Image: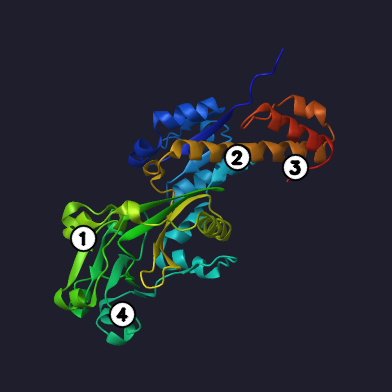
């Protein structure tokens, strides 16, 4: 008689709005068909009392939630937690968020990448001191220093001159605006799975326009401008997004891989623009943890493939540990069938590798 298929239990702890957008029936059903059961974590009860999840995915913050994750890890040492609260915290500061980009080395590409010039202003006195921001050239984008996913953290402004600076409330980050053809590339990362999409962004600002406008223009997310936030409506009506060339996938994937390893994060996206003056130069302007994956076409398959990868790796490491520590080998293995990610042939390959004493990479 054939053994029952190995199933995995993935608990998710998300705020209500995030849960409604991400946990769709289409995702739940596809995951179930691949042996993965998505189970809601009740945030009103201790995590350790809700079962031995194989994996926990989360986007909750605070000292209490951190303690709950730590307690859960003690009781369930083999469980996978996506991602580490310490690693996520780095993305809550818009300065430390982008510092990691300068540490990356991506070679063998014609394209180059970096970040825009930026400074942080902590008080009004510094904001009124021209020497503090003399290295920046107008226009600049003013962003809150804290980037914790709240509505307040998305409130930004395109500042055209000194008068506009006086309307800002520190602490803020001033980031030099780079003309980029009104297009932003959003790169979604789920482990080794990478997908790049293009969205309309702020229009280019000419020297003539810079001299004729005053103050600042407020907006929220750059790639999701509402009609009343549009700086130049005629620009958007004329613009054809389909005509925009995508950056090379290998280039984007190499950056994503470098960021994933440097930040020790699995679920994130980064926003990237192409310099209008130098078409081979790209600038990363923002990084977000656990973004709106559901806005990405086909997100269900990408996230399910990612979770399958994680669970496959988890079981493989558990099986390898049994062989190395208790020598029980086949006996221990027979008690627990490894989940088949794609087909039975992959399972056979894994069994053969382990039997030969090879961890399978």
Is residue 46 among what the camera can see?
Answer: no
* Residue ID for mark 3: 360
Q: Which residue is mark 2?
A: 309
Helix, strand or loop for disc 3:
loop
Q: Residue furthest front?
A: 243
Instruction: Give whichever of 106, 159 is nearer the camera.
Output: 106
Figure check: 304 above or below 197:
above
- Alpha-carbon distance for marks 3 and 4? 53 Å
User: Which residue in the protein does label 1 denote?
Assistant: 235
Label 4 crowd (10 A; few <14 / some 14-19 / many >=20): some
Mark 4 vs mark 2: which is more N-terminal?
A: 4
Instruction: Tell me the tag on residue 186.
Output: none
Residue in the picture at 45% in, 29% down: 28
C-alpha gap between disc 4 and disc 1: 23 Å
**Mark seen at residue 137:** 4
The picture places residue 135, in percent across and down from the top left corner, at 35, 83
Which residue is rendered at x = 28% and y = 85% of the image?
A: 130
Q: How is the image coloured?
A: rainbow
- How far is mark 3 from mark 2, CA to CA? 14 Å
1 or 2: mark nearer the eye = 1
């Amino acid at each position: 008689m054939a053994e029952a298929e190995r199933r995995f239990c993935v608990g998710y702890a998300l705020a209500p709005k995030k849960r409604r957008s991400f946990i769709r029936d289409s995702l739940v059903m596809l995951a179930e068909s691949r042996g993965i059961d998505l189970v809601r974590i009740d945030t009103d009860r201790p995590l350790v009392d809700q079962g031995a999840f194989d994996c926990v995915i989360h986007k909750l913050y605070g000292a209490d939630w951190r303690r709950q994750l730590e307690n859960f890890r003690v009781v369930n040492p083999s469980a996978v937690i996506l991602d580490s609260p310490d690693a996520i915290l780095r993305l809550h500061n818009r300065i430390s968020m982008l510092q990691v980009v300068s540490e990356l080395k991506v070679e063998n590409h014609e394209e180059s990448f970096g970040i825009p010039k930026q400074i942080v202003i902590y008080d009004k006195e510094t904001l009124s001191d021209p020497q503090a921001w003399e290295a920046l050239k107008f226009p600049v984008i003013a962003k809150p220093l804290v980037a914790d996913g709240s509505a307040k953290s998305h409130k930004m402004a395109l500042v055209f001159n000194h008068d506009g600076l006086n309307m800002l409330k520190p602490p803020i980050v001033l980031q030099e605006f780079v003309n980029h053809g009104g297009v932003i590339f959003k790169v979604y990362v789920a482990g080794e799975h990478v997908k790049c999409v293009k969205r309309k962004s702020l229009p280019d600002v000419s020297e003539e326009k810079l001299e004729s406008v005053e103050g600042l223009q407020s907006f929220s997310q750059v790639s999701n401008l509402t009609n009343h936030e549009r700086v130049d409506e005629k620009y958007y009506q004329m613009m054809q997004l389909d005509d925009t060339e995508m950056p090379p996938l290998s280039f984007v994937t190499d950056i994503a891989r470098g960021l994933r390893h440097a930040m020790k994060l699995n679920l994130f996206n980064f926003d990237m623009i192409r310099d209008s003056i130098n078409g081979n130069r790209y600038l990363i302007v923002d990084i977000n943890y656990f973004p709106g994956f559901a806005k990405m076409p086909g997100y269900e398959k990408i996230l399910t493939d990612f979770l399958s990868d994680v669970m496959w790796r988890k079981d493989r490491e558990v099986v390898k540990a049994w062989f190395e520590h208790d020598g029980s080998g086949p006996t221990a293995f027979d008690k627990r069938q490894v989940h088949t990610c794609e087909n039975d042939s992959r399972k056979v390959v894994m069994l053969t590798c382990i039997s030969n004493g090879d961890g399978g990479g």
